[in-house]
Amino acid sequence: MWTEWMAMATVFTQIMNGDLPGRIVWSDERVAAFLTIAPLTAGHTLVVPRAEIDDWTQLPAELLGHVMTVSHLVGAALKRAYDAPRAGLVIAGFEVPHAHVHVFPAFGMEDFDFSRIETNVPAERLDDDLKRIRAALNG
């Protein structure tokens, strides 16, 4: 029996398309930003291009520029929402084969340590984070 194999969309594409649940704080035709379920700090957001490109260095310059513009807006909102002195920004790219930028409220260098991510974050806290970030983006 012949079956056609289709490439599976990345987990990020599935979230952006609404096939998997996600707490989306920003969405436009080229980029979406949503909360991670494994945050470094409360409000940790991923900024993801809709194009399924694994390595950020492969993104067209214009798209990378838009990803960074959205990351800048989200970072400023995170600083306001959490009264943080800095917004951290990391491009790691090892977790999911889809380019993405980690943006999070940062209070010290320890907040950049990925061995300290939280697991099993209560849904209520993520819902509160979503509301805080959206309010800060709109304010």
Image (spheres, rainbow, N blue to C red):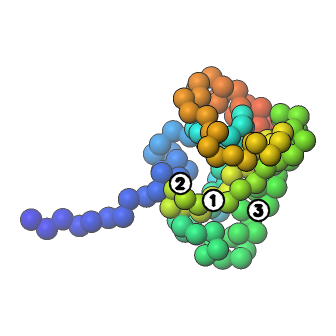
Q: CA distance from mark 3 to mark 1?
A: 15 Å
**Image quadrant occupied by the C terminus:** top right
Identify the secondary structure beneath mark 2.
loop
The amino acid beneath tag 2 is Glu
* Pointer 3 residue: 68
129 left or right of 2? right
Identify the secondary structure beneath mark 1.
loop
117 left or right of 15? right
108 left or right of 125? right
Identify the secondary structure beneath mark 3.
helix
**Image quadrant occupied by the N terminus:** bottom left
- The reply to whether the C-beta atoms of the residues labelled 2 and 1 are less than 8 Å apart is yes
Q: Nearer the viewer, mark 3 or mark 2?
A: 2
* Pointer 2 residue: 95
> Considering depth in this image, is 117 or 2 the residue closer to the camera?
117
Query: Is residue 105 at least partly visible in the picture?
Result: yes
Neighbor class of circle 3 (other Cα within 10 Å; few <14, some 14-19, many 20+) is: some
- Looking at marks 3 and 2 on the same chain, the residue that comes earlier in the sequence is marked by 3
Q: Position of residue 61 (x, y in %)?
A: 71, 76
**Disc number placed over residue 92 in the picture, else none:** 1
